[in-house]
Every structure is written in structure tokens, then in C-alpha cells.
Image: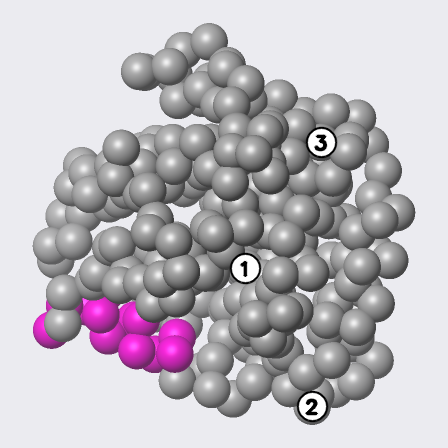
Amino acid sequence: MNFIFGKNNKTFRPKKSIQEGTHQYDLLQKAAKTLGSGDLRLAVRLPEGEDANEWIAVNTVDFFNQIHMLYGTLTEFCTDAACPVMSAGPKYEYHWADGEKIKKPIKCTAPRYIDYLLTWVQSQLDDETLFPSKINVPFPKNFLSVAKTILKRLFRIYAHIYHQHFKEVCELKEEAHLNTSFKHFIYFVQEFNLVERKELAPLQEFIDRLTSRDSSRSGASAGGGAASGSGGALASASGGSSVEQTQ
């Protein structure tokens, strides 16, 4: 597997890059410029005249890189001993299956699950038949289904971090970065209906708080103050267990 992180390493190169000079690179730069305005609702909208699949592809790659780096700063805390199951609080547990190499869901530690997950996502992003990088190469008919599965699974890393490692995030003073990244992710998947509400259940109350603040405080910065009160929101999450199934 490709994503075993070294201990105490705080900086990680993105595992998937978009080649400079391509239209997808231009889209990524456009997204970055809009993000700079602090209006995440505006930043996730499809730019006028652009292809929705290409926009989703570019942002999926970006979220993969963001989550990869965020989790990479926590690997000294997220160990087999500390996280013997992949969970998001006491009521949500995820078992891994990819439908190919592992067809029957298996219970594993959080580091192992996340390693499986990131390796699987990398393989999808590197597949030119699924995520074409060349101009005028069409996206396959199953692209949206694959993108939804990727984003659904990436959410689980956010959920694990918030439930199991938020204390360490705060100690590392990364809560503003995490909250801004997560809010951007949520606004994006909501904009294009990419993750079902039931999949967001482990963090639903927190999501409601995080997004409602933008409505009540127009013009506020994307990450400002988002961390406060998050612990209570996470502690009160409700629902049954969740088990990863094949695609």
C-alpha cells in the first residue's frame, strides 16, 4: 500500500497533481482565486460555461490532496493501538471493501482503513478512463457514480478526525485549517448532491452549526470561529452503526 505515513512528518506533497497548462489546471486556479474571497458558497458553484464533470473532477482531486495532508499531520496519534477500529464516535463504525481486491467488508484499524481508502482513491484518480486529463476526452458514463463513492469515503476521514482526534488538531493549532477545508467540502457536495444526507449523519449536527453561521454572519471569514462549540456538536451525534459495503 502507498500511504503509510512517517511519524512526526508535518508536510506532505499532494499525491495527485494536475498538470500546469491544462484546462483542469486553469479551473483549479480559478477555484483558488474564488476561495480567496472567503465566500465558500460562491467558490463551489460551477463557473459559467464550464463542464460539470470536469469541475467535479478537479475539486475531487483537490479534496483528496487536502485530506491527505490533514490526516498526515495526525498519524503519530492515529495508530493501531489508539484507533483499533475505523470509527466516527461510538455509534459509527466503518468496514472496508473495494469490490475488487476486498469484496467482503473487513473490520480493520483506522490507520489500515485509511491506508486502503487513500490507495483506492489514488488508483481511481490515476485511471485515465475515469478521470481523463486530456482535452476533448469525454468522461465515462459512470464518472459521477465513482466521484460520489470517492467523496463519500473521503468524508469518513473528516468524521474520524473530528470524533477521535480533534483534541490533537487543536493542540497542533490546525482547527481553522480543518474547519475551512471541511466546510468547503460540505458546501461542494451539497451544491452538486454528491453525498447522501444519511452518510453525513456522524457530523450532521456539526454541519448544521458550521453552515448556519454563514447564514447568520454574512461576510464572515470562511474558517473564523468555526471550531468553537464543535465538541458538543460531535458528542451529540446520533444514529446507528455504518458498515462499508462494496460499490
Q: At 71% from the left edge and 36% from the top edge, which residue is drawn?
A: 198
Residue ID for mark 3: 92
Q: Is residue 72 above or below residue 35?
A: above
Residue ID for mark 2: 219
Instruction: Classify mark 3: helix, strand or loop.
Output: loop
Instruction: Please name which of the two marks, 2 or 3, marks the residue nearer to the observer.
Output: 3
Quarter of the picture containing the N terminus is top left
Q: At 54% from the left edge and 18% from the top edge, which residue is drawn?
A: 107
**Residue placed most toward the observer, 42 or 217:** 217
Q: Which residues are magenta?
A: 21-32
Q: Is residue 131 above or below residue 50?
A: above
Mark sitting earlier along the chain (2/1) = 1
Badge 2 density bin: few <14, some 14–19, many ≥20, Cα 10 Å: few
Residue 219, percent across and down? 69, 90
In the rendered structure, which amino acid carries the disc numbered 2? Gly
Dominant secondary structure (helix, strand or loop) of the stretch shown in magenta: helix
Residue 144, percent across and down? 40, 40
Mark sitting earlier along the chain (1/3) = 3
Q: Is residue 35 above or below residue 84?
A: below
What is the CA distance from the residue labelled 2 to the residue labelled 3?
35 Å
What is the CA distance from the residue labelled 1 to the residue labelled 3?
20 Å
Badge 1 density bin: few <14, some 14–19, many ≥20, Cα 10 Å: many
Task: Kindly check if marks 1 and 3 are in contact, taking CB atoms under 8 A apart as contact.
Answer: no
Residue 40 visible to the viewer? yes
Q: Residue 196 sits in which quadrant?
A: top right
Task: Kindly check if marks 2 and 1 are in contact, taking CB atoms under 8 A apart as contact.
Answer: no
Q: At 67% from the left edge and 58% from the top edge, which residue is drawn?
A: 166
Look at the image and say whether residue 218 sits in the magenta stretch.
no
**Quick check: 178 left or right of 26?**
right
